[in-house]
Amino acid sequence: MQGERPFWNPYLAGFALGLVLLGSFAVLGFGLGASGASNRLAIGAAHVVAPKTMESAPYFSQYVGPGKNVLDDFLVFEVLGVFLGGALGAYSAGRMRKEVSMGPSKGVSRGTRLALAIGGGILMGVAAKISRGCTSGQALTGGSLLSVGSWIFMMAMFAGGYLASPFVRRQWK
Amino acid sequence: MTFPLYALDYMGYEAGLVAFTLVGVGFGFVLERAGFGRAPVLTAQFYGTDTRVLKVMFTAIVTALVGMTLLSGVGILDLGAITVPDTYLWPHLVGGILLGVGFVVSGYCPGTSVVAAASGRIDGLLTIGGVMVGTFLFGLVYPWLESFHNSGHLGVLRFTDLLGLPQAVLTAGVLAMAIGAFFVGEWAERFFTRRRNLPAPASAPRTRNGVFAVLGVLTAAGFVGLINPPATPVAPEKTFAAMNTMTFARTLIERGESLYVVDLRDPSACAVKRIPGALCLSEDDPEGAFIRDLPPTRTLVLYSQGDMTEIPATASAFTGEVRVLEGGYAAFNAQFLTTPVAPESGTTVDLARFRVRSAIHGYLTGSRAQPAAPRPKPVKMQRKKKKGGGC
Amino acid sequence: MNQPTIEVLHGRHNHLIDPALHIWGWEIPVYLFLGGVVAGLLILSAALELVRGRKDASLPMRTAPFVALVLLSLGMVALFLDLEHKLYTFRFYLAFEPTSPMSWGSWILVLVYPVAFLLGMGSVPQETRVRLIGYPPFQKLKVSSWLMCVFGRADSLRRPLLWASVVSGAALGIYTGILLGALSARPQWDTAILGPLFLTSGLSTGAAFLLLLPLDDGERHKLVRWDLLAIGAELLLIAIMLIGFAAGDRAGQIALTNLTTGNWGGAFWVLVVLLGLGVPLVMDLLEVRRRLAPVFLAPLFVLIGGLSLRFIMLASGQASSFRMIQ
């Protein structure tokens, strides 16, 4: 067994990430995304449970219905790729381990940490739908396309993070 | 311009899916190597002890921006074909703030939570679950949020339009801004880690300077496109092969199920008489929108009264093979749909032509071949037909 | 001049006129997948003992033949659900039709049961045997004497049984592919590669199934390497299949485009080739080369890929037909 490999230099990692993004623009003509796949996954799961209700709801019926496969979508495939790439990266760097990520001094209990992970996720899910994209779809993609709204989103995101950070300081200490 | 391949139809949907999956693999791999599979690394951004998020994100944005500017400057990449997200002022502002809060609470953003889950982090997996629930909740309350969700809509609004500056100039501006932000970030790292007696994050200045030297040179190269803007390339007109009446008639008879024949004349004219098996346009669909929906498994043959000068847009959208009937309906009608008159005297070639014509005429109209044709043996005609096809 | 035109229309101008045969649902792919896993389990557990000799195996390895029986039975239930005339299933066993893969299959299934059962019984450790034979209700019902007889047979026939397990497993694995290959009306299934392809897929999914369980180090060491070989062979066979289609006639071309760029093309490349084979191949190689700790993700990917292979070959295969030839 070997130890973990160090993270890449952030500037180099950013350069590599930029090349991936550029590749997406050059090959497909659109950028990256992430929350859209979770959205479709959730709708797909709900559709399995209650197909009739979902198909009759005006908002959800744009995703599910006769002749529509909610998972047959670019973002779903891309996020599957993200999972595979993340797995390959983590495994080859010796970082794949079942554990809960916590701050160095473990200021909160495991249960609290997991509850916060879910809660923050729910908040981000709502937020990503409101702003039509998340860090990947808006900040990274729209940012490099010089979209005004994406830059507003990016600045607002950093602002929101800094505003909320004192309240969850214990978690990350 | 050839790129973007998918948006310019050089690549099919399924191939696009595979390509985008591979992009995703690259995305996930790089995010993991950047350290974004770990919540403490990500959230350190908000406590100033490690500004990795800022560095990676901005370098990525600048790299992609410089690359696009350069590629479009040399005329390989069509910037206009790239999907730019619309600007919705208020949703972007509110959504951004909420997402930032969610980020620091959960420790991930939607994309990095996938990477965290892939590397075995339970909290990452739960964050994915949370995002799924959140997007679903939004769907449930959407009727009440709809007006807000669409507020402040400004369409596609890029800084190039807003400030009226060329892409290359803005690229240089963003690069300069990014470098400024990195200096602030690194200063903050030193400040906050010293205050907490933590080791400063290890960073190799040489790598950083190298990356920025490369980006700087590429940005400068982007200006070359400004000085010498590439001529706007004319989109190549999609040309269609013509099909002569004889080949068409024979294909229609022998392999009729391999063709769609569409009559582009006036619907009323088409209703009176048309090439057998042809589909007419209808009054409520004069453009022939149905052509687009035909499965591309057959060859589409179009004809109008005479030779055609342009193809309707709906036919250009047909992905299968498209042919145009030479001489149009008039030629076909004269040749095959009117009773052929046997030549009084003529060469054997004339005679053979007549036989083929009358055979096709007989087949298409149901009338018999003219009795005047000497010895109209089908076997012989068949053979002659093959000879005739060569000339 | 103005004579009426009698149109001679081809009925097949109407693109829905040809009957669409899309009759197999989820049951058949699940059955084929489970059949493949069972074939892999039988071959691998027997081969492991043939290679390493008879020594103390881990619990998952010892019980593998019984697990195989359970999985096979589940698969048979799925198959049974698909049958149109469920009451007449017994007729398969009234005759043997050498030219029918279905007949072969039904007899292979019958052969697998006793072989796997005896193989599993032979792996039951001594103390468990004593306890089973000594269990009072068993003694009363004369099960004990039967058990003694079975244990005795399973031991004395151990070596022939191991070989029988390998052979019947291979037959089962190949049969799951031939079952489709025999239906030449589907251009995409009309290839002899399907038999070996499904067999190697069965081997890798069987190995993946075992690798998800707590094996001992020696067993894992061997299985990961065999898994690598099976994945490599499978990639090669898929490549050969695609090249065969590409070099073939019009039907082959249709099969090729249908599989690689048709409605299921994206899923084929992503779920079967990338997720099911490519990524596990890299992860297994890393595990072997860098001596990394094993993770359950690679075997899980192999299993998902194997199941997807069956689903996609069936779904897209049913979308391919000679109607497309013009």
Image (cartoon, coloured by chain):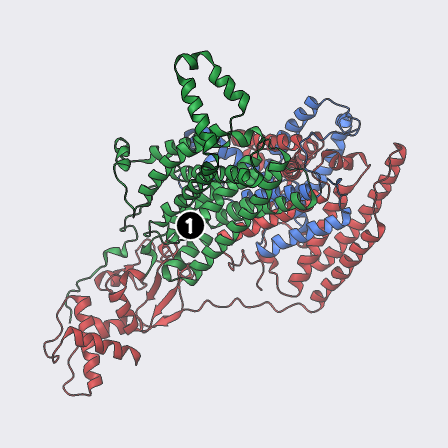
Chain colours: A blue, B red, C green
Q: Judge by depth and name the residue closer to the eye, C227 or B41.
A: C227
Quadrant for residue B202, please give it. top right
* In the displayed structure image, the side of residue B270 where residue B194 appears, left or right: right
Toward the left, the furthest residue is: B371
- Chain under numbered label 1: C
Q: Relative to B94, does residue A32 appear above or below in the rendering? A: below
Q: Relative to B169, does residue A86 appear above or below in the rendering? A: above
Q: Say if residue A36 shows up in the picture.
A: no
Of the 4 image quadrants, the one containing the C terminus of chain A is top right
What element does badge 1 sit on?
A: helix
Quadrant for residue B73, please give it. bottom right
Which residue lies at the image location 81% right of the left edge and 52% below the top edge? B207
Label 1 amino acid? Leu
Q: Relative to C153, does residue B78 appear above or below in the rendering? A: below
Residue hosting label 1: C194
Q: Position of residue A151 (x, y in %)?
A: 69, 45
Q: Position of residue A35 (x, y in %)?
A: 59, 38
* In the displayed structure image, the side of residue C74 where residue B60 appears, left or right: right
Q: Position of residue B174 (x, y in %)?
A: 75, 52
